[in-house]
Amino acid sequence: MLKCYTPEMGEKEPTTIEIRKRGNLALIKTVPIEISAMRGHYGGWYVRTKQQLKGRGIRQTGEGTYRITDLAFEKLQAANDIKMRCLLD
């Protein structure tokens, strides 16, 4: 899921909930979202993450930076939480 935030309005970076089960107990905590995205000028997405991404439509442009097609981004978005900084003009 894509989660947008606007730091100019005082919003903080979004987090996600992580649930770990140990026997009958469940540990619930909030963790920061590891994948950050921004829209490319000529279509596609630029994604920054510490995870290694592979697959069709994903090209590495630098250390931890990837250029991703729209279809690959939809699949990545369905599997992971992604944060996106939305700036006001």
Image (cartoon, rainbow, N blue to C red):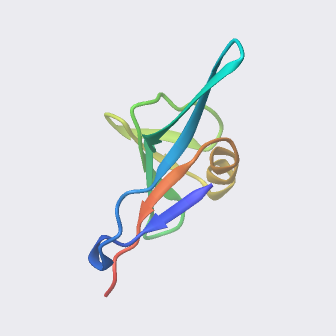
Q: Residue at x 52, y 46 (%)?
A: 16
Q: At which x and y percent is residue 76? A: 63, 45
- How many numbered markers are drawn? 0
Is residue 17 left or right of 78 when viewed as pictured? Answer: left
Q: Nearer the viewer, residue 42 or 31?
A: 31
Judge whether 50 appears above or below 65 on screen.
above
Q: Nearer the viewer, residue 40 or 82?
A: 82
Q: Residue at x 53, y 67 (%)?
A: 43
Q: At which x and y percent is residue 78? A: 70, 48
Is residue 39 left or right of 13 when viewed as pictured? Answer: right
Q: Residue furthest bottom?
A: 89
Q: Residue furthest top?
A: 23
Q: Residue at x 53, y 61 (%)?
A: 3
Q: Would you identify the image quadrant in which residue 22 lies?
A: top right
Q: At which x and y percent is residue 17? A: 55, 42
Quadrant of the snapshot with the N terminus? bottom right
Judge whether 18 appears above or below 21 on screen.
below
Judge whether 64 appears above or below 39 on screen.
above
Q: Residue at x 61, y 43 (%)?
A: 80
Quadrant of the snapshot with the C terminus? bottom left
Q: Would you identify the image quadrant in which residue 71 lies?
A: bottom right
Q: Would you identify the image quadrant in which residue 40 lies?
A: bottom left
